Amino acid sequence: MSNLSALALPARRTLDGWHRFVATGSVEVLRPLLAENIVFRSPFVVSPIPGREATVLVLTTVVKIFENFRYHREFTAGPADAGLEFSANIGKWQLKGIDLIRFNEAGEMAEFEVMVRPIKALQALGEEMGARIGPQLAKFKAASGT
């Protein structure tokens, strides 16, 4: 992992917490890292997924689906933006991806965007996510009007 010296201290602490969440899958570790009004951008839906509870649902599900998950590189774009390159497997599909994270002044994750390739792995992820949390996610989106 690279030196994240350009990242503000509160954001660096949150990113450390994020790595603990990925290692443990613990909702208790994840929830305080996220701003109440976080916006999550998924690689398979057009409109963003708003709010902490919907984001918790998505992220705790993804960590259960991904196999052999690992981060390879971290990038920063100033004190409030980080990018994390990762790889994982979903069944027979290998994937690569990027998490783009924007932090608020308190260091909480305010925006989280995921990009995944190749398309076959993305489709497998979308199918698995839909099967596990599709109805719950639809309720969150309907309640927010997105």
Image: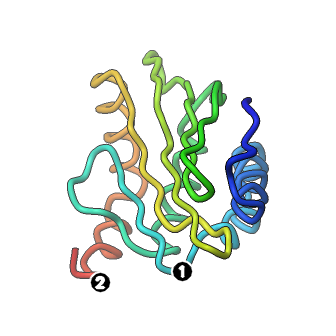
The residue carrying pointer 1 sits among few (fewer than 14), some (14 to 19) or many (20 or more) residues within 10 Å by Cα, namely some
Vertical placement of residue 131 versus 118, above or below: below
Vertical placement of residue 96 versus 25, above or below: above
The three-letter amino acid code for the residue at tag 2 is: Ala
Name the foreground residue: 63 vs 96: 96
> In the drawing, does residue 105 fall left or right of residue 65?
right
The three-letter amino acid code for the residue at tag 1 is: Glu
Dividing the picture into quarters, in which one does residue 117 lie? top left
Mark-to-mark CA distance, 1 and 2: 15 Å
The residue depicted at 63 percent of the width and 35 percent of the height is 74
Dividing the picture into quarters, in which one does residue 60 lie? bottom right
> In the drawing, does residue 135 fall left or right of residue 111?
left
Q: Label 2: state its secondary structure.
A: helix
Disc number lying in front (1 or 2): 1
Q: Label 1: state its secondary structure.
A: strand
The residue depicted at 36 percent of the width and 55 percent of the height is 41
Dividing the picture into quarters, in which one does residue 118 lie? top left
How far from the left and from the top, in percent, is residue 43? 32, 44
Name the foreground residue: 48 vs 9: 9
Residue identified by numbered label 2: 143
> In the drawing, does residue 77 fall left or right of residue 131?
right
The residue depicted at 46 percent of the width and 31 percent of the height is 97
Residue identified by numbered label 1: 36
The residue carrying pointer 2 sits among few (fewer than 14), some (14 to 19) or many (20 or more) residues within 10 Å by Cα, namely few
